[in-house]
Every structure is written in structure tokens, then in C-alpha cells.
Image (spheres, coloured by chain):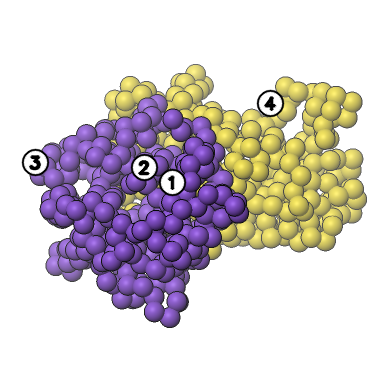
């Protein structure tokens, strides 16, 4: 069995690749290394079932066609995308070109070669839950940034291929994912950035009042979810959430990671108009369709991420 | 546990079978550590514990490998379920020191799935084949004896075991394919060959049993003993071609059953038993093929 992983050198992508390789599935990676790093794949050098790393963009239609024709993947895990909300606000043209055109190329190739598609999207297009209840797949969406808007557009495009061409497509909405191999710069996630700052003895900076909450999903659980949902054939045409199922405010997260009394600076938000104040995931559909649930608690996940950072921080 | 002065006293059933032969050879390498007695199928009757009371006495661990697989449905249930019950009842009557029982079970307790799914021990996808059910009920029977304080127990759910000594044309596609390759016969594949299974080399299976001998279950535990790797029949055929250099002819019988998978998740055995698969499928196929050519099976 062969899987094509776009964005496979990225943070979540490399974990998807690792788990596929460990399970005996052949992998082909396309990644232009715009957000990912080749070093994320260092561990797989000895794996004979990593067939190819193509360091190109999914925007190149001839390249996509060549890869699909040559390898004939059974499934495509599509994770290649821009990852930064602020950059999407500053330069939406770039996100349009990479995410929308790239996803369109992937969909066309999947249609032509009858390849199953797992589209990895985001939770960031959901509207805030008004009654504070966990967000399920029926909940209202309200994209507040071009990042979220284009993700939603890609999802809709994919779902339309399911209805129009019966392409087996599954749309996945993992909540905020963290863990080893996440970037520690401005494009990383809050857990990793906090941990890095503590290891470097720098203050933690929180945008706004810090009351915004996040549902934090450990990356290995996220990758298990993506693989299980992608390979299943009970999920075609479905949108599925995955998260821990509980949220934590950024202020509480800072205390949990740093302990009380650590230097915390509240700074003006860089994009308050795009902020979502409460995000918590309802996992029940993933549980019902896939038997999937998160296995790693927030504490365990933070410990594993910290251990990795200590070994890998420059 | 085991030290030089007090070897572990083991009783093994099914010692002349595929797994049994390899296990006994391994145990005999370390006579300081293991003191082995095998069940004598000629003189003893599994269904009548009084015929093997001496085998049941003075043992610390029983490794119960005896089973039926390709026989009639009646025989499968009689040997795998009633036979296990009789052994346990015999232990209750003649042993009395709450020994450990390691039951050889199978990932065939799980059902095949239309798409790849890695079954862990909590999986609710239960298979309905007579063999799978007989093993599931045998596990449950052992569990009850453990909960009643008569034994401590582990059930090892092995995936598809292959290796030197395995029979072709019996229950293993790997053994059959290798044998047909060695004999330069045409290989017949049911379906497209894309169905995925989880293959385990015999030495890795034996190693899991040795780890189980040293493990203290509380009081009963289940473990998948498998590779966790999806390997299709076509993967096996490709490896026979490219790694063993065989020029094989393959014919697919496409009117058969649809695509299906049966794969286990070995995470629990990894974490608790320190079980680790050491033999890659390429190495295992090579060793099995070499053995087949030597023995001219």
C-alpha cells in the first residue's frame, strides 16, 4: 500500500509519515520546505519504504501529475499548506496561490488516478461556541482570517469532488496541535513557544488578556487520528473533528507549564479581529466512526515536548 | 524470578508443533534457567487430567500451545476450548500453587476489516470464525480461573507466524508461496493480492513467550504479539522476486472475496513486555526459504 503525504516534512506531516512507515506503508513525500525541514525526516533515512522526498511545491501541476503517474498512490494525505494566520492577513495572495491552487491540483490528480484523499484542515474556521458547549462538526463556521477562509474553501472544494465525482474524500479538523518537531518561532504553537522561552529564561508573552482558550491535541494522537480516518472507508464525504475534548485558557496554560510566579507579559494582540475566545472540541463523531480518542493527557504531552526541546534546542 | 539456584519449572503442551519445536530448542539452550517438561501426547490425554497429574505438579509456568486449527469445527472447539478448560481444571486439582499459564491465542479473534485498521487489545471488532471464537472463549476461561485465584495468566494473540518448520499448504500464505517458489510452481493468489496481513517471524514469537515467562500478570492480561506492519500478499511476492531472486509465475483468482485486512497493534506488548520485532520480513523470508531448500520440503 502506498501513501502520498504532501507537507510530509512539516510538523504534523512528519509524524503522519513516521506512523505510516512504522506500519509498513510505503510513503512518497512532497514538500517544498517552505514551513517544514528536511531534518524532520532524518530518522527515516534507513527506512526502505520511504520511496521519495520531492522537494517541490504542490502548485506545480506537471510535477503532481508525474508523481501520481509514477507511484500510483492508494491514498493522499494532504497536509501541505501555509501555517501562519498573521501572514495570511498580510499577504492573502500567497495563501491563495499555495493553498487553493495546490489543493485544486491535488484534487484533480486524485480524481484522475482514483486516489483516496484525506484533507487535513483546521478548527480555526469555527465560530465561537455561544453557550460554551464543545464544538461539533455541525457547529457554525465563521472564518475570521484568510487562513481560515481558504482552509474552508479547500474543504468545500474537496467535498464537492465527493459529490460530483464520487471521489473518496475525508475532511479532518484537528484542533490546536502541539508536540515534538513543532517550530518554536512565531509560526509554532503556544505550547512549544512557552516551553522554549522557559528553557531560554525569557518571559512568556500572551496576546491580549489571556482568557482565550484552546483545546490542545498531542501530535502523535493527531497523526493516529489522521491515518485512521484517512484509511477508513466509513468516512467518505465526512468532516471529522479531533481534539482533547477539554480546553484551557492561555493564562492557565502559562501557569501549568511555567509554574506560578514566572514572568508573564500581556502584550497587545496582533490580530484581535481574528481571535477566537473559546475553542473546545466535541470528539464524539471520531469516536463513533473510527473508535478514535486521544491517549495523551495535556500534562504527558507537555512533558514529552519539553524532553524533546531540551535535546533539540539550539 | 529465575536465578541459577532455582530454575523456572515449565510445563509445555503442543511441544511438537511449529511454535513448540522452536520454543523447546530455545529453552534447552539455558538449562540453568529453565527446567522443561513436555506434555506427552502418546501417553497423556488432555481431556483427562488424571492421566497427566505428574505433569501438572511442581510447575511454576505452563505454556499451553496445543490447539486445533484446520480440523472440523467440533474438533476446533473441543481442543481449543474444552482442552484448555481441562488443563486448567487439572491445574486446580493437582498443582495448587497458583502457577502462571501462558495461552497461545491469535489475532484471528479480531475480524478482518475492509480498510487497514490496527486492532489493539480493546478492539471491539471481534471475528466470528470458529477458530477465532474458540481462542476468545479459551482466553475468557483462563481469565475466570485467574480471577478465582487458581492461576495467573497471559494470553498472547499471535499474528500470522511463519518461519523454518512452518507447513506449506496449511494455514500460512507465506509458507505456501515460498514452497511454490522453491519448487518453481505457479503461485495462485485469491483476490488481487492487495489484502494486508501482519506477519511475524517464528523467532520473534518465541521471544515473546520467553518475555511472558518473566512477566507478572495482574492476574490476567492480554497481549497482541505481532509486527504491527501491514504487509500485502503482493509485498511478499515482490520480495520473493527481488530479494530471493526467484523467477515466479503468479495467477490471480479475482472472483474471490473482496479486499480485507487483519493487522494488530503491538504497542501494549512493547510497553509492558519489552517485546520488540527483530526480524524484518525480508530477513525472515530469506531464512525460511533457505530452510525450505535445505530440507527440500
Q: Residues within 10 Å of mark 3 (few under 14, many from 20)?
A: few
Q: Secondary structure at mark 4?
A: helix
Is the Cβ of the residue at disc 2 closer than 8 Å to that at disc 1? yes
Q: CA distance from mark 3 to mark 1?
A: 38 Å
In the image, residue A170 lies at what x, y percent? 29, 61
* Frontmost residue, A131 versus B228: A131
Q: CA distance from mark 3 to mark 4?
A: 58 Å
Q: Which residue is mark 4?
A: B25
Check the residue under mark 4 and report the chain it is in. Answer: B
Q: Residue at x 32, y 42 (%)?
A: A10
Q: Which residue is mark 2?
A: A185
Shade representing chain A: purple
Check the residue under mark 3 and report the chain it is in. Answer: A
* Frontmost residue, B157 versus A8: A8
Query: Which callout, 2 or 4, points to the residue nearer the camera?
Result: 2
Q: Which residue is mark 1?
A: A193
Q: CA distance from mark 3 to mark 2?
A: 33 Å
Is the Cβ of the residue at disc 3 closer than 8 Å to that at disc 1? no
Amino acid at each position: 500500500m502506498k501513501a502520498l503525504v504532501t507537507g510530509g516534512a512539516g510538523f504534523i506531516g512528519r509524524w503522519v509519515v513516521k506512523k505510516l512507515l512504522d506500519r509498513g506503508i510505503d510513503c512518497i513525500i512532497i514538500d517544498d520546505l517552505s514551513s517544514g525541514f528536511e531534518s524532520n525526516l532524518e530518522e527515516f533515512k534507513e527506512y526502505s519504504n520511504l520511496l521519495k522526498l520531492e522537494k517541490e511545491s504542490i502548485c506545480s501541476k506537471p510535477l503532481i501529475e508525474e508523481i501520481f503517474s509514477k507511484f500510483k498512490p492508494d491514498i493522499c494525505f494532504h497536509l501541505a499548506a501555509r501555517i501562519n494566520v498573521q501572514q495570511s492577513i498580510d499577504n492573502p495572495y500567497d495563501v491563495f496561490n499555495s493553498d487553493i491552487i495546490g489543493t485544486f491540483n491535488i484534487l484533480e490528480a486524485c480524481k484522475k488516478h482514483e486516489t483516496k484523499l484525506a484533507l487535513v484542515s483546521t478548527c480555526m474556521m469555527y465560530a465561537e461556541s455561544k453557550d460554551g458547549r464543545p464544538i461539533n462538526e455541525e457547529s457554525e463556521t465563521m472564518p475570521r482570517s484568510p487562513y481560515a477562509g481558504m482552509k474552508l474553501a479547500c474543504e468545500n472544494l474537496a467535498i464537492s469532488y465527493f459529490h460530483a465525482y464520487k471521489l473518496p474524500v475525508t475532511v479532518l479538523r484537528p484542533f490546536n496541535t502541539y508536540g515534538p518537531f513543532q517550530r518554536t518561532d512565531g509560526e509554532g504553537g503556544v505550547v512549544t513557544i512557552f516551553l522554549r522561552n522557559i528553557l531560554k529564561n525569557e518571559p512568556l508573552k500572551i496576546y491580549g488578556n489571556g482568557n482565550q482558550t484552546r483545546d490542545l491535541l498531542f501530535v502523535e494522537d493527531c497523526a493516529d487520528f489522521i491515518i485512521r480516518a484517512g484509511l477508513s472507508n466509513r468516512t467518505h464525504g465526512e468532516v471529522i473533528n479531533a481534539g482533547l475534548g477539554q480546553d484551557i485558557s492561555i493564562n492557565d496554560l502559562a501557569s501549568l507549564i511555567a509554574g506560578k510566579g514566572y514572568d508573564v507579559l500581556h502584550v497587545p494582540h496582533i490580530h484581535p479581529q481574528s481571535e477566537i475566545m473559546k475553542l473546545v472540541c466535541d470528539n464524539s463523531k471520531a469516536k463513533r466512526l473510527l473508535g478514535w480518542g486521544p491517549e495523551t493527557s495535556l500534562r504527558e504531552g507537555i512533558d514529552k515536548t519539553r524532553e524533546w526541546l531540551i535535546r533539540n534546542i539550539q | 524470578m529465575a536465578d541459577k539456584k532455582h530454575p523456572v519449572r515449565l510445563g509445555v503442551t503442543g511441544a511438537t508443533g511449529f511454535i513448540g519445536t522452536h520454543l523447546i530448542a530455545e529453552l534447552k539452550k539455558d538449562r540453568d534457567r529453565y527446567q522443561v517438561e513436555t506434555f506427552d501426547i502418546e501417553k497423556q490425554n488432555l481431556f483427562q487430567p488424571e492421566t497427566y497429574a505428574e505433569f501438572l505438579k511442581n510447575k511454576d509456568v505452563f505454556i499451553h500451545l496445543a490447539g486445533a486449527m484446520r480440523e472440523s469445527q467440533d474438533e476446533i472447539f473441543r481442543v481449543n476450548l474444552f482442552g484448555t478448560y481441562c488443563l486448567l481444571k487439572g491445574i486446580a486439582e493437582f498443582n495448587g500453587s497458583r502457577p502462571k499459564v501462558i495461552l497461545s491465542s491469535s489475532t484471528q479473534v479480531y475480524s478482518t476489516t475492509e480498510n487497514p485498521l490496527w486492532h489493539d487489545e480493546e478492539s471491539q471488532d471481534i471475528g466470528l470464525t470458529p477458530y477465532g471464537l474458540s481462542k476468545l472463549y479459551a482466553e475468557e476461561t483462563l481469565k475466570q480461573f485467574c480471577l478465582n485465584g487458581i492461576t495467573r495468566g497471559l494470553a498472547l494473540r499471535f499474528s500470522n507466524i511463519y518461519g523454518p518448520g512452518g507447513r506449506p499448504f496449511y494455514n500460512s500464505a507465506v509458507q505456501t508461496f515460498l514452497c511454490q517458489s522453491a519448487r518453481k510452481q505457479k503461485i495462485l493468489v485469491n483476490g488481487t493480492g492487495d489484502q494486508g496481513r501482519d506477519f511475524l517471524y517464528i523467532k520473534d514469537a518465541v521471544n515473546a513467550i520467553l518475555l511472558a515467562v518473566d512477566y507478572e500478570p495482574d492476574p490476567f492480561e492480554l497481549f497482541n504479539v505481532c509486527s504491527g506492519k501491514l504487509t500485502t500478499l503482493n509485498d511478499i511476492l515482490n520480495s520473493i522476486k527481488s530479494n530471493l531472486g526467484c523467477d515466479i509465475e503468479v495467477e490471480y483468482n479475482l472472483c474471490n472475496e473482496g479486499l480485507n485486512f487483519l493487522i494488530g497493534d503491538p504497542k501494549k506488548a512493547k510497553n509492558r513486555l519489552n517485546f520488540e520485532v527483530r526480524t524484518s520480513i525480508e530477513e525472515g523470508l530469506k531464512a525460511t526459504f533457505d530452510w525450505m531448500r535445505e530440507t527440500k520440503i
